[in-house]
Image (spheres, rainbow, N blue to C red):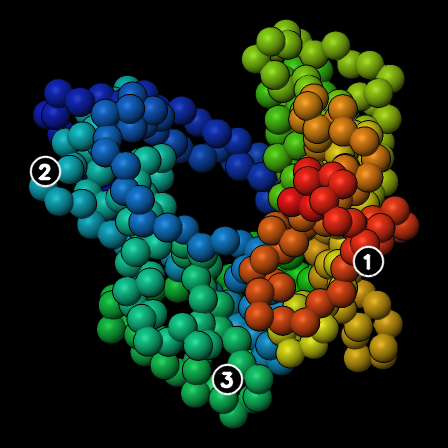
Amino acid sequence: MLELGVVEHSDSPWASPVVLVPKPHSKDGKKEMRFCVDYRGLNLVTKTDAHPIPRADELIDTLASAKYLSTFDLTAGYWQIKLSEDAKPKTAFSTIGGHYQFTAMPFGLKNAPATFQRLVNTVLQGLEAFSAAYLDDIAVFSSSWDDHLVHLWKVLEALQKAGLTIKASKCQIGQGKVVYLGHLVGGEQIAPLQGKIQTIIDWVPPTTQTQVRAFLGLTGYYRRFIKNYGSIAAPLNDLTSKKMPKKVLWTANCQKAFEELNQAMCSAPVLKSPCYSKKFYVQTDASELGVGAVLSQLNSEGQDQPVAFISRRLTPREKRWSAIEREAFAVVWALKKLRPYLFGTHFIVQTDHKPLLWLKQMKGENPKLLR
């Protein structure tokens, strides 16, 4: 880093600790370590930059409907942003070789993601109709090959003018499907990466809260592929409570939930990208543990294909509701949750709870249900 000019010698009174984090295994099987600085202390006294980070699921939905896709990964993205003279001393760290400070924005700073997202948004301003970015992952999407060539030229030209460099080995150019944010997208379809599925399959039962959170974090990222994820994962979520011991008590219910999530990921369906000119179908359901819904549309073959699964567990108060109240709540909650998809479109709500049809004839007998 010193040779690259990313760090320089420092006499700063600030000093954050250095940590070495194992990198994912490389293709040749060698284990490597990643140099990191723990900036938690500095972050505690840093004002928050509220610039929004885009929702990954919205970007994935947008890309999946395109016919041609290209993606770019910026080389050491954060390091392409230079620090001000005032900011440099605050990034200082000590090693056996001396005291140093960063000249470029390091990983770990509280506001680094917001700062980088603002930069990329500014660079791509005016190109939003065919480009998107999640931090340093930039995507270009088009409906025709001729348009795609023009769009690529405009995005690359914008990056060049901004002085940003891309890593050629991680580029995907002019593809029908691309890997983006942990998903395989394109051809109006969305699927989880097989490598991520295998990681979940190979996961051994957790023994600590940290391990449980890691497992839930990975499976939760793909919860849109899992029907009733909230209810299935409830026993594992209970283990992460502050009232529970850090060394978890692994019960039969926990093992069942663990195995069900593994099985659900093994059989995860390929999702359809949403088409807002077509009718949506919302299938809702409720149990004693939670509520859930499936958003779907008819594909090109006229078959019903899921767009997304949503779910959540019920609170102790909600669990005491009657069956019809839980089923009605499932409909209301699902429509609110799916509002970004359903607003301004035609959709049909489907339920297997026939008593809900009685609501059409109600005339004030149950104000709670009417609401």
Q: Give, as a three-letter code, the residue at label 1.
A: Gln
Badge nearest the viewer, 1 or 3: 1
Q: Which mark is residue 86?
A: 2
Query: First in sequence: mark 1 or mark 3?
Result: 3
Q: Give, as a three-letter code, the residue at label 2.
A: Asp
| Residue 369, position as x, y percentages in the image | 72, 42
The residue at which mark 1 appears reads as: 350
Q: Residues within 10 Å of mark 1 (few under 14, many from 20)?
A: some
Q: Residue at x 18, y 45 (%)?
A: 83
| Residue 192, position as x, y percentages in the image | 70, 54
Q: Which mark is residue 14?
A: none
| Residue 128, position as x, y percentages in the image | 40, 73
Name the secondary structure under disc 3: helix
Q: Quadrant of the N terminus?
A: top left
Q: Residue 348 lies in what quarter of the image?
A: bottom right
Q: Is residue 363 visible?
A: yes
Name the secondary structure under disc 1: strand
Q: Which mark is residue 148?
A: 3
Q: Quadrant of the C terminus?
A: top right
Q: Nearer the viewer, residue 135 or 235?
A: 235
Q: Give, as a three-letter code, the residue at label 3.
A: His
> Residue most toward the bottom?
146
Q: Nearer the viewer, residue 320 or 102?
A: 320
Q: Residue at x 28, y 65 (%)?
A: 122
Relative height, residue 210 to residue 142 (above, below): above
